[in-house]
Image: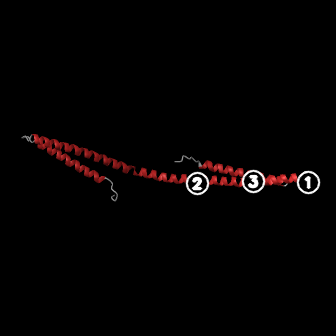
């Protein structure tokens, strides 16, 4: 994963600064070109003319290189400006996507809470079913041990079955509350 941090506004400012520098350098090179390319010989002899020619050729080479440097400088500034625009565009696009996702999360929060509430109800119903089954088991155990005249074992068995039935009914009601795709 790349950990690159770019500040498009700083890149745009740097590109503007580069454009100003490039403009100033071009103006300086243009102003110096006339006096450096055509150097007048100091005297009317061959040596002065040759020295003046050497300086003139070096000046032409310098201005040729300066032209290439200016072109490179301008291209660098354009690329920097384009990169700043690209980064700004990427930030704007990701901002839009992130805002959409955040909106969806906020929108789904009540649904998530409803599902959690229903799930808790189902968990409670399953716990009650377990307790009812324990009660039924105890009633059967007691019924097997003593089927006395007071009918206590049968009453305990009946209460366990009644609790089991109510818990299963509550479970069904809570399951019907679950949102299922295709239903509203």
Which mark is on residue 65?
Answer: 3
Cα–Cα span, label 1 and label 2: 59 Å
Work out whether mark 2 precedes mark 3 in sequence or the reverse, and give the earlier one. 3
Q: Which residue is mark 1?
A: 46
Residue at 65% across / 51% down in the picture? 15
Instruction: Find residue 79 and report its horizontal and vertical position in percent.
Output: 64, 54
Exactly how many numbered labels are in the figure?
3
Q: Which residue is mark 2?
A: 86
Q: Residues within 10 Å of mark 1 (few under 14, many from 20)?
A: few
Work out whether mark 1 precedes mark 2 in sequence or the reverse, and give the earlier one. 1
Cα–Cα span, label 3 and label 1: 28 Å
Query: From the viewer's perspective, is 151 left or right of 59?
Result: left
Residue at 61% across / 49% down in the picture? 9
* Position of 40 relative to 130 (above/below): below
- The label nearer to you, 3 versus 1, is 1
- The label nearer to you, 2 versus 3, is 3
Which mark is on residue 123?
Answer: none
Residue 54 visible in image: yes
Cα–Cα span, label 2 and label 3: 31 Å
Residue farthest toward the bottom in the current orientation of the protein: 182
Query: From the viewer's perspective, is 48 left or right of 114?
Result: right
């Amino acid at each position: 994963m790349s950990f690159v941090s770019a500040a498009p506004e700083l890149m745009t400012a740097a590109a503007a600064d580069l454009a100003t520098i490039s403009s100033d350098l071009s103006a300086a090179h243009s102003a110096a070109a006339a006096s450096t390319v055509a150097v007048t010989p100091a005297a009317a002899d061959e040596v002065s003319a040759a020295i003046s020619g050497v300086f003139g050729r070096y000046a032409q080479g310098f201005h040729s290189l300066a032209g290439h440097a200016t072109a490179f400088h301008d291209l660098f500034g354009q690329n920097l400006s384009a990169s700043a625009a690209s980064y700004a565009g990427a930030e704007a696009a990701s901002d839009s996507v992130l805002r959409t996702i955040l909106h969806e999360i906020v929108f789904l929060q009540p649904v998530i809470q409803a599902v959690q509430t229903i799930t808790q109800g189902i968990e409670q119903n399953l716990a009650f079913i377990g307790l009812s089954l324990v009660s039924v088991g105890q009633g059967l155990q007691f019924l097997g041990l003593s089927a006395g005249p007071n009918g206590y074992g049968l009453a305990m068995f009946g209460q366990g079955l009644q609790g089991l039935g109510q818990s299963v009914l509550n479970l069904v009601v809570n399951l019907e509350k679950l949102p299922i795709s295709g239903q509203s």
